[in-house]
Structure formats: structure tokens, C-alpha cells
């Protein structure tokens, strides 16, 4: 409680300046809203105030409604809005109708509730770099304080829908050209200009605009209906499982057809519904879970400061090394890329060039920045230039003896403070560093492919890795815009390990009679970017089979030995790269199911000695989803129980950012808790009896099922073994 406030200052010119003060982003907490309301009312009452300017302290207008208040509100009874809702409602609706004009002075951010407050003012002045937007849909809600009605009236329906549905903020310059902002000024002239503007409104030298009742930007009704229907179709196509974008479009439509007051009413009612939805709860959970990944007990609470990393070297310019280098140069880190010979080096640098060029093509990067980023890469064929590097990330091929040799070399050539990181996806770090005396600075930096795009970074620590090294990598991870999770050293680490049973279970059920394409379809309908069979096609059967061998060695009690992929591999059918895997791929990489795979399935079945189970043909999508994901949950429980992660929500983030688990389901653990440990245990138990030990519930899950406990708190009950 007691977070944030506003200040009121009345000048000799008769303009009251109300400043939102709630660092770091001046979010609108309940306290801020009350204070804003009080100061606004005071300004209206005072005879020495002619006009009002609202702004934010520290160069930021407001980052929007305070989501921690939001989660408190979620706990309240729906239909009885909290004080926060009443305040903002009064603010946005009474400001506009007040007899004193108000002007918003916008710098930094005006997002969500922040922009809604600004739009309720009679004019807005902004800096060119300010960001203005309504990103509420990202949290499973809709703009709730008049944004659905005012934004279309200020910028037109097409642009407003784009900004709201894509949660895409725009810069001050664009906002000015669209009419969302009335003037662009520099930061130092901002409040002064806003004050003059407000006084001009008082003197009728500038228009007194009530954005809620503007109509000039709205498209004619027939055209508006077409735009709204198109937006509906797009929203359904992009996220078939999400309701709130459609609710938002309905609310906007109500305002366009029946007028802004009817629109506001519908907005208020709909907000109450969406804020209580599972989608909103899940997305708010993900919001907080993501922010908490960088808080690691035993690392970030020791009072250590991250060291400055100014020069990074990468070993191996293959798929991963070039992706990692791309991520680093995009954040202005100079990189040395070392390869085995000049041809491989050229190929590696060309990969980086292609990664950057694709950003230019997509409009995410200017030509000038492209050149600047590429110039940060220096090639090397030996360790001569490694004498002053602060961090090395090794991404050579997955071979134990090669990696051991490489780490012995690194110990010899790099300075003693240098962090020695490996991007290995499977090899034990203790083995990699076996012949060195540097285990305290050896750490895993496990990127996901493609490394410059995938947002997750697993930081793998052994029991000897120093907290300082982990802290440094957490810092680097954040600087290159990754979400880092700190995990323990075991086969597959946290994310790949917990998702290994995803494909295994799918293979087992195909042997027992389930159609692989039906499994893939159920998974994509559930919200996964691809099903397990499309995924192994992408990874390639060679790699997938090799990974299977590793898991079999580490977890022989719970691996399913399907012959399906090895049989296909024998016929040089090895996934997308070979043009054929579980699917057929044409020259344009268009995929289609392949009837030929039936013969491999039959062979695999007979090798496994099973006959198809007719019951499996009748399964619903829900059953299929449980069959492939409950074994994942079971492994996640083991990961928690062994202390591989320090908190369960890290697995939620790992599942979403590493594997594409739908964020609106909150992540694997959040989703599992919605089913309940007892239910999951019961289902796994049934399948164990029918299909074998692959499904056997682990002791942690059994305990949670018996005690009625939640997986989300399970990590708190165990001691990290790190
Ligand atoms: P890759 O085969 O595409 O690239 C490896 C590169 O390392 C080759 O260009 C090779 O010439 C180079 N290399 C070999 N010995 C070297 C040395 N002594 N010095 C410098 N360069 C050397 O392999 P990829 O896929 O990039 O994998 C690299 C590492 O990343 C492996 O440990 C792999 O397990 C891991 N990884 C791979 C992922 C993937 O999806 N491919 C995902 C996450 C981790």
C-alpha cells in the first residue's frame, strides 16, 4: 500500500500542473488514481486555477494501470468494482466535461490507462520520442477507461484497431500526424507549451476538443462495419482461442453504431467480464512470472553487482553461434567469431549478415544500423585476440571430447576473469570442464534456436559455478533482450527435459493406433505453434534420435523406445531438411500429410509388438492434449522436486518462451494446477496400467495429489541441489 501519488502546483499564470509520481514508470496505482482525482477536484474548485496540465515525473507520463493493483482487483468480486475503477471512470468522464480545460504533457510513455487519461484531456502535447498505445489486450483485458471509444475518434477506426488489437504503441511523431497529439515539442519545453496551450483554450484561441464526441475521423457507417468485420476475421485467424479481442471489437462497434455513451457503458460491462476470465488470470500470471525470473535466491540477494562485459567471443559460427552473435551485436556488443577455417568463418559471418538483413527486410532495422551491427563482428581462426575477452560462448558441435579440448584451450588463452560459457544442449558441464581448474567460471548459456529470435536463455549452473558468474549472465541475458531462467545441470536442463515426453508420448500413442496428424492438429488447436511431429520434422530425425539416446541413458526408467523415426531414417527420410519426414515438403516448404508414413507406422507397431487400440480412434482433442502434456507435467514435477529450478513459475516461462506453450494458458505449471494434481495423477495412473511405466506418476506428483497441494508451490518445498 501507499504506492505513488500526484503533486499539484499552481502557477501565477493560473495553470495547475498535476504531476504523476510513481517510479519507475508512473503507473496508475489505486493511490495514484485517488490522488489524481483529489488534485483534479481541488484544481477545479480553486478560484486561482483557470486551466490544468497533467504530466508525469522523471520524463514519463504514465506506463498505465498498475498491474499489481490489477491482480488485487482480480481477487475481488466481479460486479463490485474496486475504488480504482471508480476513480479512473470519474477521471476520464468528468475531465472532459469539466468547465476548466486540461492538457496532457506527454514524454516517455503514455500507455494503457496513461493514454486513456491523456485522451480525456482537451489537448495533448508530446515529445517526438514518446510512446503512446493501448496494449491492454496483452494482459487479457480490454482498454477499460474510455480508450475503446476515444482512440477511434481521434485517429480513425482502422488505425485504432491496429493499435489496440496488435498492442502496438506509436511514437509521438506518428501520433501527431494522426491527430492523437496536437503538438510536438522538446522535453524541456513540454510543460511550458502545455500550459500555454491550456490558456489558449481558456481564451478560445485554441479549440476545446472533447475527444469522446469527435466524429470527423470516424469512417462512414457502412465502411466502419466492413473494417470491424475484417478485424473480427483477422482476430479469429490469429488467435482462435482468445475471446477478449472479439469482445473489444464488439465494444468499439457499439460506440460506432450506438454512440460513445452506449460504447462506454458496454466497455465498462465487458471489462468486468474479461478481467475475471481465465485468459486474463493466466496472462497476468505470466507478466509477473517473467519479471521474477531474474530474482534468484542465493544469487541476486547477495549484494553483488554485475561486472561489465565489453568484449565477447563465440566459438563456432554454425546455426547457433551465428544466431548468438546476431543477438549480441544487435545490443551493441563487439563479438569475435572463431571458426576452424576461412570457409567456415565466411559462412558464419554470412549467416549473421543474413539474420540482420532479414530484420532490414521486415523494417525492424535501418541500413545504417545494419552496417553498424555487422561491423561489430570480427572473425578469428585462433585464440590470439582472446586475451582481453570478458565472456566466451562456446557453440561448437555437440561432441564431448571436442568441447573438453576447447575449454582447456580457453582456460589457457582467456584472462582469468573471463566467463567460460557453453551452449551445449545435452552435455554435462562437469564433464566439459573436467580437465580445467575453472569450474567456478564455467556455466551453461543455453539459447534456443533461432538464437537471435527465441526469447529464452537457460543459464545452467553447476554446484561450483560462482554466483558472480551467474549474476553476470543474468545481466547480459537481459541486455540482449532475453528472458533468462537459472537452472541446474542435468540432462536436457529444465525446458528440453520437461518437454522430452511430449514427443515420446505422441510416438507411443501412434504405435497404439492414434493418427499423428490428429495429434498435431489437437496441439495446434490447443495453441502450440506446432505439434510434436511437425516439431521433429523441423529439428531433424538425426538430432531427435541422438537426443533420445541421451535421455535413455539418463532416464532409462521412463523412455519409450519407438522405432518409428529410426525406420524412417533408414530410408533417408529425416525431416524437413530432406523434403520428407512425417509430412511432405514442396520446394516452397509448403507441408502436406504423407500417406506413405502408414507403412512405417505399421512396421514400428509390429516392432513394439502392439495392436492398435480401437478406443484411441474415438478420443477427443481434450483427451489427446492430456495424453501428450500430462507426461510433460509429470517430468516438470521431477524437475521441481530435484530443485533444477528455484521456482515453479520459471517452468511456466520456460514452457512459453522455449517451447511455445500458449501464454494465455499461463504456462505448463499454471495449466496443470487448473486441472489439479489429483486429476493428473489419476489419469497418469490409468495409462500406466494400460501402456506401461512411461506414464508412472513421480513421487512428488503423488504427494501433491494426496495432499491436495499445488504444483506452483512445489518448488518451495524442496531444497535446490545447486
Ligand atoms: P553447427 O554444426 O551448425 O555449428 C557448429 C560449428 O562449430 C561449425 O561451424 C564448426 O565448424 C564449428 N567448430 C567446430 N570446432 C570448432 C572449434 N574448435 N573452434 C571454433 N569452431 C568450431 O551446430 P549448432 O547447431 O550450431 O550447435 C552448436 C552447439 O549448440 C551444440 O553444442 C548444440 O548442442 C547446441 N545447441 C544446438 C541447438 C540447435 O537447435 N541446433 C539448440 C541449442 C543448443
Image (spheres, rainbow, N blue to C red):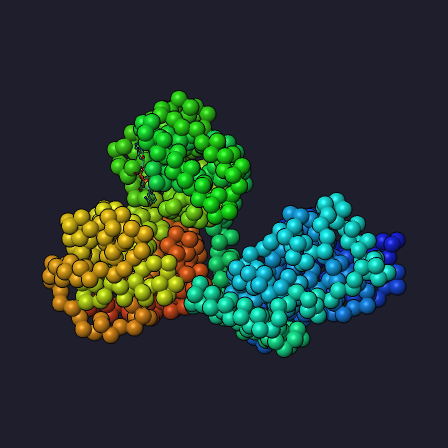
Q: Picture coordinates of residue 668 (x, y %)? A: 39, 60
Return the residue nearer the eye: 397 or 550: 397
Return the residue nearer the eye: 718 or 515: 515
Residue 210 appears in view: yes
Left or right: where does residue 661 sit relative to residue 620? right
Q: Quadrant of ligand 1?
A: top left
Q: Residue at (46%, 38%) from the top-left corner?
A: 328
Left or right: where does residue 85 sit relative to residue 544? right
Q: Residue at (43%, 68%) from the top-left corner?
A: 241
Looking at the rendering, which quadrant does residue 339 occupy? top left
Q: Quadrant of the N terminus?
A: bottom right
Question: In the figure, 206 relative to 403: above or below?
Answer: below
Question: In the figure, 541 relative to 74: above or below?
Answer: above
Q: Residue at (12%, 59%) from the top-left corner?
A: 603
Residue 297 appears in view: no
Return the residue nearer the eye: 101 or 646: 101
Left or right: where does residue 86 sit relative to residue 249? right
Q: Picture coordinates of residue 355 (x, y %)? A: 42, 41
Q: Quadrant of the C terminus?
A: top left
Return the residue nearer the eye: 520 or 633: 520
Q: Residue at (74%, 69%) from the top-left corner?
A: 94
Q: Picture coordinates of residue 262 (x, y %)? A: 64, 77
Amino acid at each position: 500500500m501507499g504506492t505513488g501519488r500526484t503533486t499539484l502546483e499552481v502557477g501565477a499564470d493560473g495553470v495547475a500542473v498535476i504531476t504523476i509520481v510513481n517510479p519507475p514508470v508512473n503507473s496508475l496505482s489505486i493511490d495514484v488514481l485517488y490522488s489524481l482525482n483529489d488534485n483534479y477536484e481541488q484544481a477545479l474548485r480553486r478560484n486561482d486555477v483557470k486551466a490544468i496540465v497533467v504530466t508525469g515525473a522523471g520524463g514519463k507520463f504514465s506506463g498505465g494501470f498498475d498491474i499489481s493493483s490489477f491482480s488485487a482487483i482480480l481477487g475481488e468480486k466481479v460486479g463490485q468494482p474496486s475504488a480504482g475503477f471508480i476513480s479512473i471512470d470519474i477521471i476520464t468522464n468528468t475531465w472532459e466535461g469539466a468547465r476548466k480545460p486540461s492538457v496532457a504533457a506527454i514524454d516517455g510513455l503514455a500507455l494503457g490507462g496513461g493514454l486513456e487519461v491523456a485522451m480525456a484531456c482537451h489537448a495533448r502535447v508530446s515529445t517526438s520520442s514518446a510512446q503512446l498505445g493501448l496494449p491492454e489486450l496483452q494482459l487479457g483485458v480490454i482498454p477499460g477507461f474510455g480508450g475503446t471509444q476515444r482512440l477511434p475518434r481521434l485517429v480513425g477506426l482502422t488505425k485504432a484497431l491496429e493499435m489496440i488489437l496488435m498492442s502496438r504503441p506509436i511514437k509521438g511523431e506518428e501520433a501527431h500526424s494522426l491527430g492523437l497529439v496536437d503538438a510536438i515539442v522538446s522535453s524541456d519545453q513540454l510543460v511550458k507549451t502545455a500550459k500555454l496551450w491550456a490558456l489558449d483554450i481558456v481564451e478560445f484561441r485554441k479549440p476545446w476538443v472533447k475527444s469522446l464526441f469527435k466524429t470527423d475521423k470516424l469512417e462512414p457507417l457502412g465502411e466502419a462495419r466492413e473494417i470491424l468485420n475484417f478485424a473480427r476475421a483477422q482476430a479469429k485467424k490469429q488467435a482462435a482461442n482468445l475471446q477478449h479481442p472479439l469482445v473489444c471489437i464488439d465494444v468499439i462497434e457499439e460506440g460506432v453504431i450506438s454512440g460513445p455513451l452506449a460504447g462506454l457503458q458496454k466497455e465498462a460491462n465487458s471489462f468486468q467480464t474479461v478481467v475475471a476470465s481465465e485468459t486474463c488470470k493466466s496472462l497476468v500470471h505470466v507478466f509477473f512470472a517473467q519479471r521474477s525470473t531474474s530474482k534468484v535466491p542465493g544469487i541476486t540477494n547477495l549484494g553483488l553487482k554485475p561486472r561489465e562485459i565489453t568484449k565477447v567471443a563465440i566459438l563456432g559460427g554454425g546455426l547457433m553461434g551465428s544466431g548468438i552473435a546476431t543477438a549480441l551485436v544487435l545490443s551493441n556488443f563487439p563479438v569475435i567469431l572463431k571458426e576452424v577455417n576461412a570457409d567456415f568463418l565466411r559462412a558464419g559471418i554470412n549467416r549473421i549478415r543474413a539474420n540482420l538483413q532479414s530484420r532490414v527486410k521486415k523494417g525492424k532495422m535501418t541500413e545504417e544500423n545494419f552496417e553498424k551491427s555487422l561491423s561489430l563482428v570480427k572473425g578469428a581462426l585462433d585464440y590470439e585476440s582472446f586475451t582481453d575477452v570478458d565472456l566466451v560462448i562456446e557453440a561448437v558441435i555437440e561432441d564431448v571430447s571436442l568441447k573438453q579440448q576447447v575449454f582447456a584451450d580457453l582456460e589457457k588463452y582467456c584472462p582469468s576473469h573471463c566467463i567460460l560459457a557453453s551452449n551445449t544442449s545435452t552435455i554435462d558441464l562437469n564433464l566439459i570442464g573436467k580437465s580445467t581448474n575453472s569450474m567456478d567460471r564455467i556455466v551453461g548459456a543455453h539459447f534456443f534456436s533461432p538464437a537471435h529470435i527465441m526469447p529464452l536463455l537457460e543459464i545452467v549452473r553447476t554446484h561450483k559455478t560462482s554466483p558472480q558468474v551467474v549474476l553476470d549472465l543474468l545481466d547480459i541475458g537481459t541486455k540482449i533482450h532475453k528472458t533468462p531462467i537459472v537452472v541446474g545441470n542435468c540432462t536436457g536442463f529444465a525446458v528440453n527435459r520437461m518437454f522430452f515426453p511430449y514427443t515420446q508420448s505422441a510416438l507411443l500413442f501412434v504405435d497404439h493406433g492414434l493418427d499423428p496428424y490428429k495429434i498435431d492438429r489437437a496441439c495446434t488447436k490447443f495453441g502450440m505453434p506446432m505439434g510434436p511431429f511437425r516439431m521433429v520434422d523441423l529439428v531433424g530425425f538425426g538430432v531427435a534420435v541422438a537426443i533420445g539416446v541421451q535421455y535413455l541413458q539418463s532416464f532409462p526408467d521412463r523412455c519409450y523406445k519407438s522405432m518409428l523415426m529410426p525406420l524412417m531414417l533408414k530410408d533417408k527420410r529425416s525431416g524437413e531438411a530432406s523434403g520428407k519426414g512425417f509430412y511432405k515438403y514442396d520446394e516452397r516448404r509448403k507441408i502436406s500429410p504423407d500417406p506413405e508414413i502408414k507403412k512405417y507406422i505399421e512396421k514400428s507397431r509390429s516392432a513394439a509388438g502392439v495392436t492398435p487400440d480401437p478406443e484411441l480412434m474415438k478420443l477427443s482433442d481434450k483427451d489427446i492434449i492430456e495424453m501428450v502434456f500430462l507426461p510433460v507435467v509429470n517430468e516438470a514435477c521431477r524437475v521441481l522436486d530435484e530443485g533444477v529450478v528455484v521456482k515453479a513459475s520459471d517452468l511456466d516461462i520456460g514452457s512459453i518462451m522455449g517451447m511455445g506453450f500458449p501464454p494465455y494458458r499461463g504456462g505448463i505449471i499454471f495449466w496443470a494446477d487448473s486441472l489439479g494434481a489429483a486429476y493428473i495423477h489419476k489419469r497418469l495412473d490409468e495409462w500406466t496400467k494400460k501402456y506401461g511405466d512411461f506414464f508412472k506418476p513421480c513421487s512428488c506428483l503423488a504427494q501433491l495429489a494426496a495432499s491436495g497441494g499445488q504444483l506452483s508451490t512445489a518448488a518451495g518445498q524442496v531444497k535446490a541441489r545447486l
